[in-house]
Image: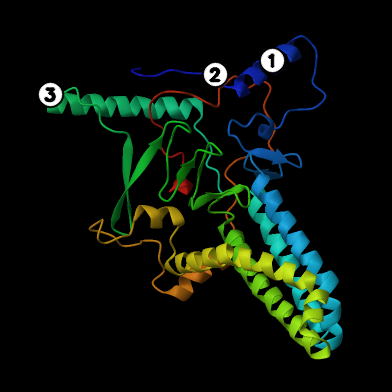
Amino acid sequence: MANSKVTHSPQNTVANNNTSKMGAGKARSKLQRKWEIYPGKNKFYCNGRCVSSPDLGGFLACFFLIIVTGGLFFALDCPYLAVNVNPVIPVIGGLLWIFILGCLFQTTFIDPGIIPRATLHEALEIDRLYQLENQQLQETNGTSYQAPRFKEVQIKGRSFKLSYCTTCQIYRPPRASHCSRCNNCVERFDHHCPMVGNCIGKRNYRYFYLFILSTATMCCYIIGCNVTVIVLRSKEMDVGEAFKKSAGSLIQAVICLGSLASVGGLACYHSMLVCKEMTTNEDIKGTYNDRKFKEAVNPYSRGNCVLNCLAVLCGPRHPSLIDRRGFVDPTDETPTMVDTNGARGLPGSHHV
């Protein structure tokens, strides 16, 4: 087969080693799970139940900022506001704070929609078909022109080209893209977010959007409470003394104003994308820009803002495509990674 090179993967090496050990009568006490030999750069936790990008520095900084700001708010402002304004204020703040942390952890530690890489048989078969089609095209045109690797699909009357990923050995589905940081193709890829330490894709986009929206809301809530505390204290004592007693409130306000400048703008931008049922990747590339493309109609839009919001935020969460907690078969000698310099077709309709 032309331009085909098979490379045995770490998975195959482990499988061969396991087979030889079992043949020698040394049975393994514990089977190895697939996440332990996963070829991407992702990190797995809790025995494969949680997955994130290789760098969690942004997540830790974000988590620390939320904890510190919330701690100052509940320790310094809430007791005063509960007595002098309304005891519901700390309750609302606490619920919002817990909701923010829940969305952050969901965004960071669930599979964003990673697409499985090609198996040996899939990659070689589709590579064979590609070489055959390319050979027929060369014979028809009488040239040695090598056709580019892509496939065309029709979605609601619009033609889309499925680009070939040389790393994952697949034709990427519409809206999917390869993240160089995580080294995986992701369904409905929006962007890689260092702030939360994960890709934002089909399975965790709603949690990311709710996280930035609730964070912006919490920032406004805390700033409003800070101003209220300072104003009420200034009525009880001198303004200078009120500011001295409200030093913690000033620190919170500065942190929240800085956060709101970035998170607030991000929340507004993604609110626009949700209403249009678009991704950041599509918006940057101008996929549905009628000035750039003639057939610039978004086939994923439901026709109005309300339906688009319901589809993005209230639809069912799609199951993960990677069996990261499955066991590696110690007798399986079939490599699961292959470098064919060729193509892989879609393994099933669920990829489109």
Question: Mark 2 or mark 1, which is nearer the start of the sequence?
Answer: 2
Disc 1/disc 3 C-alpha distance (Å): 49 Å
In the picture, the disc for residue 142 is 3
Q: Which residue lies furthest to the left in this view?
A: 142
Q: In which quarter of the image is the N terminus?
A: top left
Q: What residue type is labelled 3?
A: Gly
Residue in the picture at 64% in, 72% down: 217
Image location of residue 43, percent across then percent down: 67, 38
Q: Which amino acid does label 1 sit on?
A: Asn
- Badge 3 density bin: few <14, some 14–19, many ≥20, Cα 10 Å: few
Q: Would you say 88 lies left or right of 57 here?
A: right
Q: Would you say 220 lies left or right of 31 here?
A: left
| Label 1 sits on residue | 17
**Quarter occupied by residue 123:** top left
Disc 1/disc 2 C-alpha distance (Å): 13 Å
Image location of residue 235, percent across then percent down: 79, 90
Q: Determine if residue 222 is in view.
A: yes
Q: As rendered, which of 320 and 219 lies closer to the eye?
A: 219
Q: In this view, does 340 lie above or below 325?
A: above
Question: Mark 2 or mark 3, which is nearer the start of the sequence?
Answer: 2
| Label 2 sits on residue | 8
Q: As rendered, which of 214 and 137 lies closer to the eye?
A: 214
